[in-house]
Image: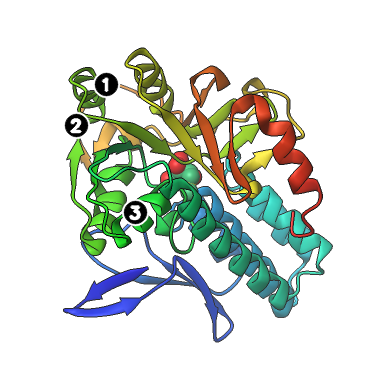
Amino acid sequence: MKVIIDGEVRTLKAAWYEDGEVKLIDQRELPDKIKIFSAKNSDDIAYAIKNMVVRGAPAIGVTAAYGLAMASKNGEDMNKAKEKIRATRPTAYDLFKAIRYMEVNGYDMNAARRYAMEIEGRSKKIGELGNELIRNGAKILTHCNAGALAVLDWGTALSPMRIAHNEGKNIFVFVDETRPRLQGAKLTAWELAQEGIDHAIIADNAAGFYMRRKEIDLVIVGADRIASNGDFANKIGTYEKAVLAKVNGIPFYVAAPGSTFDFSIRSGDEIPIEERDENEVLEINGIRIGPNESHSKNPAFDVTPNEYVTGFITEYGIFKPNELNKLKDLMDKDLFM
Ligand code: MRU
């Protein structure tokens, strides 16, 4: 992704390997500062994933792949390294896919590089296919951050918007702020601003207002895990947006690479949902907003049933929820998967 640092345009990825370390854009610091986090061993990798230095399902997978290759080069105990990394975030399927990929490929650094290249290439393809759904003048809603930061480059939900914009289409993006961690307001808005894509941050509870006024034409979100029947987990609040979209007759698309599809589970009921620290809700940027006596509940994701999904935009094509068996056939023939 292109970023402007001190007035200079530079190209950065969300994660890369350099001089024996895994480097990550520290996403906790955005949009105020562009800081690079260096992971030197599997403990650092587990810390970075758990504490959301890096986040977004595909980017978590790439970080795990690089992290395991680095741990192997360091001579670490690989079972312990895998256990630590696996225990970080339970919902994003890409994490488990990447660990499996590295097991099969002997924790080799070239395999990690290949994994990263594949994920990046596939997210561009998602953009090219998803761009077909975006007409000139489209007003699109997105939730959380499914952009370059959540992948490596391009993004999943944001990839079609990037390509539409690069082709000269005039688009406008409604960005849900995405409480509690504000990935929309902090990360998606930052990416769109860097690219010069017209957008506005809206409070999470404002989406229905704009949908009812017919000011939103299309919703595109990412996913953390998609079950065989098309139920999918994504950032908390996605379910509400999907229901509102259906009630208002607005197409609702999920953009995700094959690495996010978990065909070992039948429905969304089997997706493990991460519960995070209550302070993420009780505080904003470290400042407490609720009474000291109050507690919070903080599920990081929700599950949207398949009936609310118009289609899944993947690198293999766009599929309706009842067509995922065709996607599975294509993935079964794909050596990378
Ligand atoms: O908790 P996060 O920030 O990792 O959640 C991210 C999301 O929910 C994204 O929409 C999803 O991972 C898809 S990213 C291409």
What amino acid type should be assigned to the residue bearing mark 1? Glu
**Which class describes the residues within 10 Å of circle 1: few (<14), some (14-19), or many (20+)?**
few
Relative image position of residue 123 (x, y in whole percent): 52, 56
Q: Earlier in the sequence, mark 1 or mark 3?
A: 3
* Residue holding disc 2: 289
Q: CA distance from mark 3 to mark 2?
A: 39 Å
Between 32 and 185, which is closer to the camera in this rendering?
A: 185
Numbered marks: total: 3
In the picture as drawn, the residue positioned furthest to the top comes out as 247
Which residue is at 46% across, 46% downward? 130
Between 333 and 194, which is closer to the camera in this rendering?
A: 333
Relative image position of residue 321 (x, y in whole percent): 61, 27
* Residue holding disc 1: 293
Q: Quadrant of the image for the N terminus?
A: bottom left
Between 93 and 40, which is closer to the camera in this rendering?
A: 93
Relative image position of residue 17 (x, y in whole percent): 55, 77
**Which class describes the residues within 10 Å of circle 3: few (<14), some (14-19), or many (20+)?**
many
Of discs 1 and 3, which sits in the foreground?
3
What amino acid type should be assigned to the residue bearing mark 2? Ile
Task: Classify mark 2: helix, strand or loop.
Answer: loop
Residue 278 vertical position relative to residue 152 in the rendered view, above or below: above
Q: CA distance from mark 2 to mark 1?
A: 12 Å
Which residue is at 29% across, 38% downward? 140
Of discs 3 and 2, which sits in the foreground?
3
Relative image position of residue 9 (x, y in whole percent): 26, 78
Which residue is at 40% across, 38% downward? 220
Specify the label residue 164 is tagged with. Answer: 3
Left or right: 147, with 124 as reference point: left
Q: CA distance from mark 1 to mark 3?
A: 48 Å
